[in-house]
Image (spheres, grey):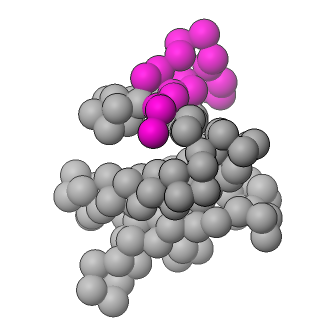
Amino acid sequence: MYYVRARAMCDGFGCGFPAEFSEDAPVHEYILVMDGDRPVSTCRIHYLDADTGKIERVATLEEYRGKHFGQAGIAEAERCMKSKGVTKVLINSREAVLGFYKKLGYVPDYSKRSGSGEFCCVMTEKRI
């Protein structure tokens, strides 16, 4: 998981290690998608309350993007959350990849924007 995030975010987007990993906590759950024995995609699950979960820190190695590995990670995170009673999932999507989340059924709320530049984000929501 750390390998994928370091390669995809720190190397790929120039995020510093402290910024990328500072919010990780023992209460979070993580999904790791493998291609054989190689880790290629990951995301973090954060439970906000009994009904609401948030998928965070979605990252896929550049050479694996567009090959459904990220989609597989999101689907697994949704399954995990649904098994715990979550009915609403949030993802804070970079605007540049908003289409990816829309295809997975997430609805953007353009009134909830954050960040700037490459990391200008829009909150999305999906009922599961």
Residue at the limit of the structure toward the left, as seen here: 67
Determine whether, in the image, residue 88 is placed left or right of residue 22: left
Q: Position of residue 43 (x, y in %)?
A: 52, 59
Q: Is residue 51 visible?
A: yes
Determine whether, in the image, residue 121 is placed left or right of residue 33: right
Q: Residue at x 62, y 19 (%)?
A: 113
Q: Main secondary structure of the magenta part?
A: strand
Q: Considering only vertical position in the picture, is 78 above or below 113?
A: below
Q: Is residue 117 visible?
A: no
**Residue stretch rendered in magenta on the structure:** 107-128
Q: Position of residue 38 (x, y in %)?
A: 35, 83
Depth check: give the residue in front, 45 or 34: 45
Q: Position of residue 92 (x, y in %)?
A: 57, 35
In the rendered image, which quarter contains the N terminus? bottom right
Depth check: give the residue in front, 77 or 112: 77
Total of numbered circles in the picture? 0
Residue 119 lies in the magenta-colored region: yes
